[in-house]
């Protein structure tokens, strides 16, 4: 009897994954909700992240705007092979409320899938599939940016896919561009990994 229950649960899980994959693949477009920094930590020292108040008040928005302003470089449509509509207003409001006094960390934090689900509940729309990057770490010692790539039903807040990606910084002049290079590396990694993510 126990064996039958385990087999049933296995097939139920696989069926849900297949259903989510079909919904994602069938969707004509995604809504881009932006970069959510509410779970993020800046890993390093006071020297690495000296003006954390400015990071919250200015740079969070700059990194989000950069993706919109440079669509050829940060090409969401090519990365996900979907038409993209943009709605970063919720991310902007949420990011502005981050407590800069808690932003610095001496070691990377880990954002759990449960926490990702909690973040997604703050994003909504009439219908369709939303796309959101939940930032975990801007890690200066490791020279990496790590974040979750999340696809979700905007009406029900059901997470359809959530995958972590860790990306090496590529340099860049100035604070904004230096860290944006890690996000750009993420775009390149996602384009390679996304087809396999849909199958896993």
Image: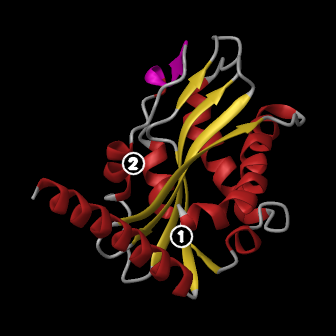
How far from the left and from the top, in percent, is residue 89? 49, 63
Horizontal and vertical percent for residue 14?
37, 67
Color scheme of the displayed model:
secondary structure
Q: Is residue 109 magenta-colored?
A: no
Whole-angstrom CA distance, mark 2 to mark 1, is 19 Å
Q: Is residue 76 above or below residue 176?
A: below
Q: Nearer the viewer, residue 10 or 119?
A: 10
Q: Is residue 30 left or right of residue 144?
A: left
In the image, residue 153 lies at what x, y percent?
Answer: 38, 73
Q: In screen coordinates, is 184 left or right of 51?
A: right
The segment highlighted magenta reads 101-106
- For this view, does 154 lie left or right of residue 177? left
Q: Residues within 10 Å of mark 2 (few under 14, many from 20)?
A: some
User: What residue do we see at 88% from left, 37% from top?
Assistant: 172
Q: Which is closer to the viewer, label 2 or label 1? A: 2
Residue 86, above or below 35 = below
Residue depicted at x 55% and y 12%: 106
Specify which label sits upstream in the sequence, 2 or 1.
Answer: 1
Q: Which quadrant of the figure contains the N terminus?
A: bottom left
- The residue singled out by tag 2 in the image is 116
Q: Secondary structure at mark 1?
A: loop
Q: For this rendering, which residue is in front, 108 or 122?
A: 108
Give the vertical position of 82 relative to 66 (above or below).
below
């Amino acid at each position: 009897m126990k064996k039958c229950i385990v087999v049933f649960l296995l097939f139920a899980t696989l069926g849900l994954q297949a259903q989510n994959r079909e919904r994602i693949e069938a969707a004509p477009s995604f809504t881009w909700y932006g970069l959510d920094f509410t779970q993020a930590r800046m890993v390093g020292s006071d020297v690495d992240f000296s003006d954390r108040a400015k990071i919250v008040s200015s740079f969070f928005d700059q990194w989000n705007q950069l993706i919109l302003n440079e669509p050829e470089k940060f090409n969401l449509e090519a990365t996900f092979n979907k038409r993209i509509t943009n709605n970063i207003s919720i991310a902007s409001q949420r990011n502005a409320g981050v407590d800069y006094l808690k932003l610095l960390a001496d070691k990377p934090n880990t954002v759990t899938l449960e926490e990702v689900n909690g973040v997604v509940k703050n994003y909504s729309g009439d219908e369709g599939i939303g796309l959101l990057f939940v930032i975990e770490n801007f890690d200066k010692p490791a020279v990496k940016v790590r974040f979750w790539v999340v696809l979700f039903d905007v009406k029900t807040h059901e997470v359809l896919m959530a995958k972590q990606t860790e990306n090496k910084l590529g340099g860049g002049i100035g604070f904004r561009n230096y860290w944006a290079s890690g996000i750009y590396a993420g775009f390149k990694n996602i384009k390679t990994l996304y087809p396999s993510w849909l199958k896993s």
